[in-house]
Image (cartoon, rainbow, N blue to C red):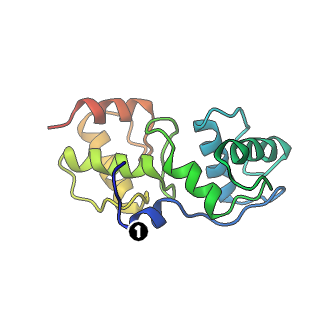
Amino acid sequence: MIKYVDATVNSLSTGPTLRPWDAQPAVVELQELLRAHGFRVPVTGEFCSHTEDAVKIFQQRKGIRVDAIVGPKTWAALKLEVKPGSRVLRRGHSGMDVYELQGLLLVNGYSITRDGSFTEETKQAVIDFQKFHKLKETGHVDRVTWSVLQSNGH
């Protein structure tokens, strides 16, 4: 296992405490992370019963207290164990997949901070990369952008 400084791990694995029936932007990221971990939940931004069930199963599998509350331990498990390329990344996301994205951008010659948080700086580097490689300039990292990033290291 690669060792990361505590500050990086903390920035990778944080998120607001979410409870069933919450409706806020962080619920979208939660649902996208659950989908990246193989759960078939709709991405609605509302912490519905489908999301609640998926969170409980995820918590049980990871040995986390099963309460459907997404706190620090659940966020950490979701974000630190997410496979790069398994979700579309965009500004505001964080996790190991964002950390890996930033590493690929560095390898491809973009000077950015590698901290696992998809900031405006990361978004601009993604747009610049997409423009250079004649990809759709969305600032989001989808499967196509991942593929070009991974095959284009210098």
Q: Residue at x 75, y 41 (%)?
A: 57
| Label 1 secondary element | helix
Q: Amino acid at mark 1?
A: Asp
User: In x, y percent, where is residue 142?
Assistant: 45, 36
Front in this rendered view, residue 9 or 65: 65
Left or right position of 47 against 59: right
Q: Residues within 10 Å of mark 1 (few under 14, many from 20)?
A: few
Residue sitting at the far left: 154
Left or right position of 84 against 36: left
Q: Which residue is mark 1?
A: 6
Please identify the quadrant where the C terminus is shown: top left
Residue sitting at the far bottom: 7
Left or right position of 128 against 81: left
User: In x, y percent, where is residue 145?
Assistant: 37, 35
Q: Residue at x 40, y 61 (%)?
A: 120
Q: Residue at x 72, y 60 (%)?
A: 24
